[in-house]
């Protein structure tokens, strides 16, 4: 759809959901901002889709090109602060859209992690950014050592993100997974990094059947056809992480504190799932984004 139609569609969706989820005003003191919260989140989501991943870039783009749709855009610093303060609203919107896509009660889930660089690893000892929170880690899929955080993503079989948690890069991904397991059941597909007898037993107690490829020194008694199916389905989460990385730059930090980090990740996941929702209601595959936005 044309960009202006996309902006209008996203705004109407977000504004309806904000009114549904927050019938009581979010601010009980002082004057509300002239730029409504629905408008601010719309600017963030659309900005992500158009390749503007920094707060300042989003503000500049809408100030230059869409002032007639958003006449009350404030100063850059005020917009950045307002957007960051809405992190919990974006998370609630994300949960509600997952429910609208009936992805909250799926019986097949995929789990994986990805690196989020804070600074170049060689500069980490001199950096003060996230000094007490980030860590050194290794990404096996990219054969990459890095300094920063690790994002842990849970998606259902269609590729719709339904869970996310953020840890320091040196936290074991199996330990991080517990934050996302209590709300799911059925089959969970992971890579070799999730192999641990205790973790598998804990999954079974929660009604979750964990399936992973096995290491070369492990005997696999499962049918080969089942193993191939597991591998093929599990690639879906690699596709989603690739989209979040290439389209939304989720692996780049671009911030200096957890407040802004939480807000930025929330808007990227929200943008991805709004795209999936628009695809689904249009009868397209959930993560087929190529023709979602067209030039005017």
Image (spheres, rainbow, N blue to C red):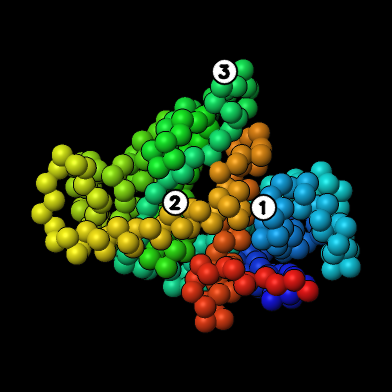
Quadrant of the rendered structure where residue 119 is?
A: top right
In the rendered view, does 40 fall on the left or right side of 271? right
Q: Tell me if label 1 and label 2 are in contact, CB under 8 Å.
A: no
Q: Residue at x 61, y 61 (%)?
A: 271
Label 3 vs 1, first from the N-terminus: 1
Residue indicated by mark 2: 153
For label 2, the SS is: strand
Q: Residue 28 falls in which quadrant of the image?
A: bottom right
Write the residue at 73% across / 74% down.
2
Q: Which one is closest to the eye, mark 1 or mark 2?
A: 2
- Give coordinates of residue 204: x percent, y percent: 20, 53
Along the line of sight, which residue is nearer the eye, 15 or 28? 15
Sequence-earlier tag: 3 or 2: 3
Q: CA distance from mark 1 to mark 2?
A: 21 Å
C-alpha gap between disc 3 and disc 2: 28 Å
**Is 149 above or below relative to 201?**
above
User: From the viewer's perspective, is the residue at label 3 or at label 1 nearer?
Assistant: 3
Say if 118 sits above or below 224 in the image.
Answer: above
Q: Residues within 10 Å of mark 1 (few under 14, many from 20)?
A: many
Tell whether 166 sits left or right of 209: right
The residue shown at (63%, 22%) is 128
Q: To which residue does mark 3 refer?
A: 125
Q: Would you name the residue on which mark 1 appears?
A: 86
Instruction: Please state the horizontal and vertical placement of residue 129, each as a whole percent of the image.
Output: 62, 27
> Element type at marker 1?
loop
Any part of residue 44 in sight: no
């Amino acid at each position: 759809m044309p960009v202006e139609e996309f902006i209008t569609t996203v705004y109407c969706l977000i504004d309806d959901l904000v009114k549904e989820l927050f019938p009581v005003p979010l601010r009980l003191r002082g004057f509300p901002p002239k730029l409504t919260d629905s408008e601010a989140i719309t600017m963030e989501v659309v900005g992500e889709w158009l390749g503007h991943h920094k707060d300042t870039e989003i503000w500049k783009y809408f100030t230059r090109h869409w002032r007639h749709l958003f006449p009350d855009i404030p100063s850059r610093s005020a917009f950045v602060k307002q957007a960051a303060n809405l992190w919990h609203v974006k998370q609630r919107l994300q949960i509600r859209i997952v429910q609208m896509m009936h992805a909250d009660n799926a019986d097949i889930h995929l789990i994986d992690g990805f690196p989020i660089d804070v600074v170049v690893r060689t500069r980490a000892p001199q950096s003060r950014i996230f000094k007490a929170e980030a860590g050194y880690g290794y990404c096996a899929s990219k054969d990459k050592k890095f300094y920063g955080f690790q994002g842990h993503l849970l998606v259902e079989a269609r590729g719709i993100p339904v869970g996310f948690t953020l840890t320091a890069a040196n936290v074991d991904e199996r330990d991080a997974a517990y934050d996302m397991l209590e709300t799911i059941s059925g089959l969970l597909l992971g890579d070799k990094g999730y192999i641990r007898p205790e973790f598998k037993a804990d999954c079974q107690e929660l009604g979750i059947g964990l399936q992973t490829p096995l290491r070369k020194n492990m005997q696999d008694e499962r049918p080969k056809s089942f193993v191939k199916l597991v591998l093929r389905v599990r690639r879906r989460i690699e596709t989603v992480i690739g989209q979040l990385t290439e389209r939304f730059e989720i692996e780049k930090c671009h911030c200096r504190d957890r407040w802004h980090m939480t807000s930025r990740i929330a808007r990227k996941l929200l943008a991805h799932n709004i795209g999936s929702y628009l695809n689904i209601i249009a009868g397209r595959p959930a993560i087929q984004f190529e023709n979602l936005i067209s030039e005017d």
